[in-house]
Amino acid sequence: MVREAAPAFFTHPDLGDSIGDDVADWVGTLQLGNGEFFVPDVNQRALLRAMFAGPPGVTYQTRDKKWFSSQVAVVAPRQNLKTATLEMGVAAALWLLDARLVVWTAHLYNPAAAETFLHFKELIDCNPHLSRNVKRVLEASGGQGIELMNGARIKFQARSKNAGRSLSGDLIVMDEAYALSTAEAGALIPTRSARPNSQIWYGSSAGHLDSDQLRLIRDRGRDGVPRQTYAEWCSTAECASDRCNHEIGEPGCVLDDVEEWAKANPALGSRIDVDTIRDERVSMSSLEFARERLGWWDEPSAGQVIPGPRWAACATDGAIVGPVCVFADIAIDRSVSVVAVCGNDADGIPQVELADMAAGTDWVTDRVSQIVGRNEVLAVGARSAGPVASLLPELKGVCEESDTEFVKVGSGDFAGMCGLFFDAVSGKALRHRNDPRVDAALTAARAHQVLDAWSWERTKVDVDAAPLVAATGAFALHAQRSRVVEVDPLQNIW
Ligand SMILES: [Zn+2]
């Protein structure tokens, strides 16, 4: 008998007097179509215990007694335990725990919701004590659901069909949650104050690059946060070489390690057999296999030059108070232009901001002229080549009129500026105002190798590096000019 692997991460509130064991016992009496019973295994029982932890007497209708977890997330490779556990919980919510409305959602083009609908019909058919309470089963395409005698309902929905429409219910299940963006989740989930004691459950396999909602839940869940249950099955092992390319048979590669398969797949040896996974290893790409069978997430930070948390650590609400340097740049398709400024804040720490980012290119010179006219400006800069080159004569003219230094930055010098910028962010020697336009460029940006240094890559079309180029340039010009003042002994005559 194979012992099912425990989750690699499992955080939850105190279990207190959880009714999860009662739920598990009740579910275990339900007959399935194949004549077996719907008996939770060790992991499923542990999950039910965490999901249904709450004060004695808690149900979905008790406003004064709340579930200890308002959110529950189960992340595991497919065919293991995730969907069945959520189905067990939904059956209990509806037949035992007074949920009036349960909404089961899955990603469009995914038959998962239809599959779950079939399972519920099977449960009803095989269990007279359930079917006695069923008023009707709704089969209409897009409107599948089950209604009980007391008016309680479960609805099955594909999420994208309801884009822009918020969901309301005592229990909302987001199956295939890897396909959910943060914006989508925000639009789907209404304020839950209208319901006395609601929950949201997420089920998913490991996240893809754009699984931002699930990644948010994971980052909080792995550490553990109040009112959230989080369980994740995956391999946390690392390949023998950090340059392993995960080809089949590569020595020390985790992707070929059956013991690691077992850690990520608790059903290995029972519902999933080893040969099935061997076949997948051969037929899938290495990255897909790692994600789908080992629970390895596709991480956007894998090639990201400045990791998001490090950048976030430099955010401020403060303002620039000192003289500034200005840097202009234009997107590679010339659709937008950016003007960034950098100056010291009240603590003497340089702060970067986008003064402007707007469509077209013809406004840039006027805006720079305005900044130079109204503020103390140490220098104005732009790249010497690339899209912004067409503006160089005008920008130079503006600077000459106002007796301001103008700097054309060649690619070697700009690579040095990128290094300065990177070091400043790493050492928290820079501040910014969490501008989403810079954040987007930062997330998309990749480093482009220039001799032995690197520079922001300009080939990305969907999110251009221009905001980042401008911010980097403004910061570096400022750093160089402040340094001249600080270290030049001749200027320091007092
Ligand atoms: Zn490997």
Image (tube, helix red, strand yellow):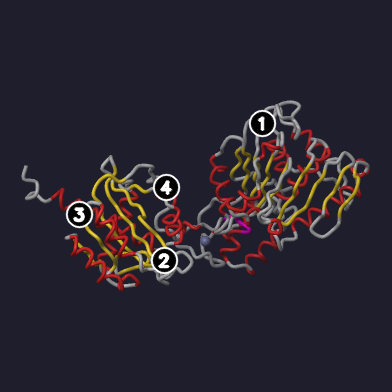
Residue 15 got which mark? 1
| Alpha-carbon span between mark 2 and mark 3 | 28 Å
Query: For the C terminus, which image quadrant?
Result: top left
Find numbered disc 4 in the image and state the secondary structure of the residue it sits on. helix
Tell whether label 4 touches label 2 (CB within 8 Å).
no
* Number of residues whose C-alpha sits closer than 10 Å to that of mark 2, classed few (under 14), some (14–19) or many (20 or more): some
Which dot marks residue 481? 3
Q: CA distance from mark 2 to mark 1?
A: 54 Å
Q: CB of mark 1 within 8 Å of CB of mark 3? A: no
- Mark 3 lies on a secondary structure that is helix
Under tag 1, what secondary structure? loop
Identify the residue at image location x=71%, y=37%.
195
Left or right of 211 on screen, residue 390 = left
Disc 1 marks which amino acid?
Leu
Q: Distance between the Cα atoms at labels 4 and 3?
A: 26 Å
- Tell me which label, 2 or 1, sits earlier in the chain: 1
> Could you tell me how far apart the alpha carbons at marks 1 and 4 are, in whole angstroms?
34 Å
- For residue 470, which quarter of the picture? bottom left
Look at the image and give the residue range highlighted in magenta: 292-296
Badge number at residue 336 = 2
Residue 283 image position (x, y, % from top left):
64, 69
Q: Quadrant of residue 407?
A: bottom left
* Residue 231, x across and y down, in percent: 63, 44
* Some atom of ligand 1 lies within 8 Å of the CB belonging to the residue at label 2: no
Ligand 1 closer than 8 Å to label 1 CB = no
Q: Three-letter amino acid code at disc 4?
A: Ala
Q: Which one is in front in this view, the residue at disc 1 or the one at disc 3? A: 3
Residue 441 as seen in the image, left or right of residue 231: left
* Earlier-in-chain disc, 4 versus 3: 4
Task: Give the percent coordinates (x, y) of residue 133.
Answer: 91, 41
Q: Who comes first in sequence, dot 2 or dot 3?
A: 2
The three-letter amino acid code for the residue at tag 2 is Val
